[in-house]
Amino acid sequence: MARVPVKLVSWEEIVEWSRGLADRIEESGWRPDVVVAVARGGFVPARLICDFLDITDLLSVQSQHWVEAARAAQKAILKYPYRVDLEGKKVLIVDDIVDTGDTLLLAKEFVEREWGPSETRTAAMQWISSVAKFKPDYYYLEVRDWVWFQYPWTRLEDTMQFIARILREDERARSGVSEDELKSIFREWYGVDPEELGFYWELALKRLREKGVVRAENGKLLPR
Ligand code: ADP
């Protein structure tokens, strides 16, 4: 069993899941005038939904997480709370996944309060029903056991974070590991074979070296 369960999601799956989500919206008989993507995760699904439902108006709000002082919990806030007039419009707010649900709920409350639409509904490709405080109006897949979905648009970012975490937290990595050893620890931690990551693996190591998170010494990789 992986320490952190990760599922690599392909671009093909993203198209299929977004298409499935668009179908649910269409089948409900409700048609939004405007789509709002929650940045950054909602961008690709929102754009695909516009394509599948033939919608031209696409806006975005960006959420950000703050670690509250002296608290472990993170609080979601909106980074650029700008105003637009959406009076009389039906608005669909789209994200990739509803995990705790804080982000989508925050975006919905903000749009309703500040942009004045006639109605808002929420949609996400995936909904983690065992964890979420909130069920979106539309979703395509219900997820029961928590997994980190490694979406194709954060492949580099996530791979860097996965490697950095091993170097910080795995005893074996502290004193230095060969790249092959690192790959095997990576498989153990995340249940993902680095070979499946293609060029992202090398690129992640390169970026981590540039950032000084990893250093190479006598053929071994070490945390800084
Ligand atoms: P919170 O706001 O508490 O972080 P959300 O459920 O609102 O939780 O998720 C915010 C964003 O974090 C999502 O839109 C997604 O991009 C990313 N995310 C959260 N959980 C996962 C997960 N299990 N797999 C992949 N991405 C996730």
Image (spheres, rainbow, N blue to C red):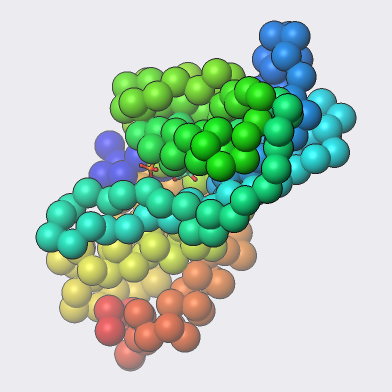
Picture layout, residue 171 above or below residue 18: below
Q: Position of residue 73 (x, y in %)?
A: 22, 49
Q: Position of residue 154 (x, y in %)?
A: 55, 55
Q: Quadrant of residue 171?
A: bottom left
Picture layout, residue 61 above or below residue 128: below
At x 29% / y 80%, what residue is drawn? 222
- Observer able to see residue 43: no
Asked if residue 32 lies left or right of residue 190, the reply is right
Picture layout, residue 221 above or below residue 28: below
At x 62% / y 34%, what residue is drawn? 116
| Residue sitting at the far bottom | 218
Asked if residue 193 lies left or right of residue 191, the reply is right
Q: Quadrant of the C terminus?
A: bottom left
Asked if residue 182 lies left or right of residue 97, the reply is left
- Observer able to see residue 31: yes
**If the picture is divided into quarters, which one holds ligand 1?**
top left
At x 83% / y 33%, what residue is drawn? 55
Q: Quadrant of residue 82?
A: bottom right
